[in-house]
Amino acid sequence: MEDLQHWTWLFGRAQQMMMEQGLDLAGQMSAMPAAPPVDPAAALRAGAEFWADTMTLWQRFLDPAKAPKFEETPEQARDKRFKAPQWREQPVFDFIRQSYLTLSNHLLKGVDQIEGLQPKQKEQLRFATQGFIDAMSPSNFPATNPLVLERTIETKGENLLKGLAHMLADLSKGQMTQTAEGVYELGKNIATTPGQVVKRTPLYELIQYSPTTETVFETPLVIFPPWINRFYILDLTPEKSFIRWAVEQGLTVFVVSWKSADATMADVVWDDYVERGQIDAIDTVRQLLGVESVHAIGYCVAGTTLAATLAVLAARGEAEKVRSATFFTAQVDFTEAGDLNVFVDDEQLAAIQSLTTDGFLDGRYMAATFNLLRGRDLIWNYVTSNYLLGEDYTPFDLLHWNSDVTNLPAKWHSSYLSDLYRDNLLVRPGALAIGGTPIDLSTVKTPAYVQAGREDHIAPARSVWKLTAHLSGPTRFVLAGSGHIAGVVNPPSLGKYQHWINEAGATNLDDFVAGATEVKGSWWPDWIAWIEQIDAARIPAKKARIPPENAELGAAPGRYVRTR
């Protein structure tokens, strides 16, 4: 009777929570467009193969000794969803796991066999199918996940109630929680590198960091992070901070902190990020320090923009303002731009424009898009751990940053997707212009360091490589282990991952990889050595190299990084 009362209370409380939240899920399902017909012979073969595999599964379940062993692919063997021993040691759940993996394989094969689709359409269908497969994993449902069942029995269902509270809280704020909240505070235990805001405009703040060495490189460094995220991805905890590390190498470091878009930025376009953003920041650093040129870094979309900035400066006879350019996972040629391409067609662009409010796009939509690219890790992993198992959120600086979204100017966002991702205009000389100055990347002769991530899903290495073919100056390409974030934020002190270099040179990525030398650990030391080869001159770290305190502008990390 006591147990019955407990379970009655549990489901009653769950119902009450959902009613209080005012959930209305009716009408949320949209119809999928009909797929083109498949070749009948191929369909018959696919059906026969599926049923043959299904019969083998049943044989394996009913008589394991006589049935052929289930052969996992390397990817399936590494699948974190099924790493718990229960998925293999308990026959029922082993059967569920094998059935799911078998069906998943056949669903993806079915996409490949569909005829009459354009390559882009097939990519979109495959992406949608993979998303459906990930969503339907047995690990995502209480009745088919042995760990959830065990936890439910152990806690008498308290885990499901706690998980429901997590889910309702996320629905209320319109964003999935991925890490413990209230743990990190800007300027206290994250984004703590000492510095001062030295300029504030309606578009950005410019932060200058305090030197920690007696001498510094004569040529300063200005970093342009992407405005689709907060700049402190490069200034996480002190041991992970690229900014702090660069200062310790003797660089005078400036970082642009972009303003999260609001109604005042309704008319901001790409030209503004080039002219009033990057070129203005470069000129400001030159004037503040009295130098002729700067080293520049552009990360992701800011790297794409940096390439355009260099072309504009070259066309205006001002190329010498940038001594060297470094590109972190940046693209200029979008023909192989990866999974993000599936979100870019006329239908998708119209849908995005419909989400615009007061001239800007809420950053939560962009965050959801990036989470979809890694749905298994960035969505369903948290459904299982926090909604089903009812686990508490753990502190993680990288996920804190990932959840700290920024809004985007709607006009810029729309034109960026259509002009670059859809129409690939940046690599067509003269197809785009900034302030009346045509862009031709082939005129850029600035020495360039191009970094790519081997496992990058946002800016695939094959796409980043194309940058080396469009610039005319000397380039050094480095392939880093891991992906779009961890491949960049990899301090030498951690001894993680690896990178590849190829001193002999290569004409394409495959040749680069074939002749590359693997180097353990971070690529950061290789980069600073490259900087020193370009310009090793140093001067005392005094006068303008020490940022002045300004009560109105304030200290790093500034005001814009704290505002939505």
Image (cartoon, grey):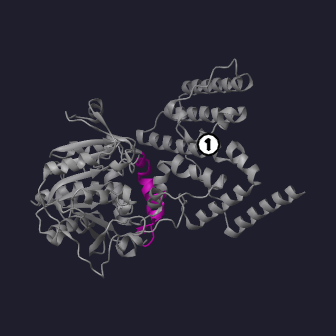
In the picture, residue 269 is in which quadrant?
bottom left
Can residue 425 be seen from the camera position used here?
no
Q: Residue at x 30, y 33 (%)?
A: 513
Q: In the displayed structure, would residue 201 be above or below residue 278?
A: below
Q: Which residue is located at x 56 percent, y 43 percent?
A: 34
Judge by depth and name the residue closer to the eye, 34 or 247.
247
Residue at screen point 16% across, 51% down: 532
Q: Position of residue 333 (x, y in %)?
A: 28, 46
Does residue 22 appear to the left or right of 414 in the view shown? Answer: right
Would you place residue 105 above or below residue 19 in this image?
A: above
In the image shown, does 361 or 89 lie closer to the viewer? Answer: 89
The residue furthest right is 1
Picture coordinates of residue 262, whole percent (x, y): 40, 73
| Residue situated furthest front in the rendering | 214
Magenta region: which residues?
A: 339-367
Report x, y in % for residue 426. 25, 52
How many numbered marks does the figure carry? 1
Along the line of sight, which residue is nearer the eye, 333 or 428? Answer: 333
Q: Is the magenta stretch mostly helix, strand or loop?
A: helix
Residue drawn where x is 56% and y is 67% of the image: 173
Which quadrant does the N terminus fall into?
A: bottom right
Tell me the crowding category of disc 1: few under 14, some 14 to 19, or many 20 or more residues within 10 angstroms, Cα based. some
Q: In which quarter of the image is residue 252?
A: bottom left
| Residue at disc 1, secondary structure | loop
Label 1 belongs to which residue? 137
Magenta-colored stretch includes residue 446: no
**Residue 17 appears left or right of 433:** right
Measuring from the top left, give residue 537's x and y in whole percent. Answer: 11, 56
Q: Check residue 360 for magenta coloring.
A: yes
Q: Residue furthest bottom?
A: 552
Q: In this view, does 228 lie to the left or right of 34?
A: left
Which amino acid is tagged 1?
Ser
